[in-house]
Image (tube, rainbow, N blue to C red):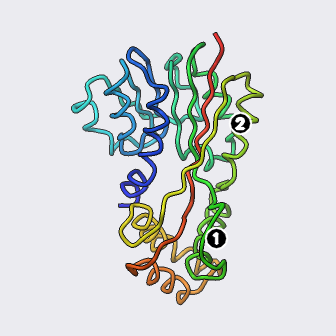
Amino acid sequence: MRLDALSRMFDPATRSRLAQLARPGMRCLDVGAGLGRISGWLAEVCAEVIALDVDTRLLTNLPKVFPTVRVVEADVTGDLGLGTFDLVHCRLVLMHLRNREEVLRRLVDLVAPGGWLVLGEAFEAPVVTGPPDSPFCRMMDKHWRGLERSIGTDGKWGLRYPELLRQAGLVDVGVEMYQPSVTSTSAAGEFFQLNFQHLRGRVVADGLLDDETVDAALEAMRSPDFSELGMGLLTAWAHKPR
């Protein structure tokens, strides 16, 4: 399952950052909660967590395990009517939205004075170790071009967060990059094998790559000797003054 692999790929970095900010008594909002693992982790620390997603079918059992979690099915681009929060976390959402700057302003408004906003976005790999014309690197590039063409994804959107957060009046702005290793057995490797298979039909139909190149990329990734860097996770955080 791609979402499971993606979660295992990026959750350690997200938890590490949130651990620096989450405190007992906080009211938290997890936007784009997905499988609910970050919402559940926040529930172990904070007083109340709202897990928000446009599709909550994967979150049905979350409140049974974590009674302080409330699941809300809603679109973050609309009016949520949920009040404000001491901590707002949003990962891998805004980069896919065409009205991302408007949604960012909505998220800032959801942060209570004295609270924190934490944003995470996947980022086009700034560093790879293999030749750029290798099947893996070519497939990775077309993965981004295909998302950009089909839904408007911006793989470099996260780079703007420090500037945008300061413009929004937030302070104590920080940013960091996490770039996990892609191997035949890593969560990142599992995700990209599944994702390349998922995208095969689209990139071939659009003339971005041929089947032979996709097959070569997948075969390379299955090798025990394969080791490469895939997309990174850029996380930015900032504090709203009281």
Other-residue count near label 2 (Cα within 10 Å), few / some / many at <14 / 14–19 / ≥20: some
The answer to whether residue 79 is left or right of residue 168 is left
Q: CA distance from mark 1 to mark 2?
A: 25 Å
Q: Nearer the viewer, residue 67 or 191?
A: 191
**Mark 2: which amino acid?**
Pro
Looking at the picture, does residue 65 appear above or below residue 149? above
Element type where label 1 sits in the image: helix
Residue 68 coordinates in the image, percent (x, y): 30, 22
Farthest residue in the bottom direction?
A: 212
Residue at 40 percent across and 32 percent down: it is 51
Element type where label 2 sits in the image: helix
Which quadrant of the rendered structure holds the N terminus?
bottom left
How many circles with numbers are drawn on the protein?
Answer: 2
Residue at 61 percent across and 37 percent down: it is 236
Residue at 44 percent across and 34 percent down: it is 52
Front disc: 1 or 2: 2
Looking at the picture, does residue 37 appear above or below residue 142? above
Q: Nearer the viewer, residue 61 or 161?
A: 161
Instruction: Tell me the residue that label 2 is attached to.
Output: 162
Instruction: Tell me the residue that label 1 is attached to.
Output: 141
Residue 87 coordinates in the image, percent (x, y): 50, 24
| Circles 1, 2 touching at the beta carbon (< 8 Å) | no
Quadrant of the rendered image containing residue 40 = top left
**Mark 1: which amino acid?**
Asp
Quadrant of the rendered image containing residue 127 = bottom right
Residue at 39 percent across and 64 percent down: it is 186
Residue 81 coordinates in the image, percent (x, y): 52, 20
Of mark 1 and mark 2, the one earlier in the sequence is: 1
The answer to whether residue 58 is left or right of residue 114 is left
Farthest residue in the left direction?
A: 64
Which quadrant of the rendered structure holds the C terminus?
top right
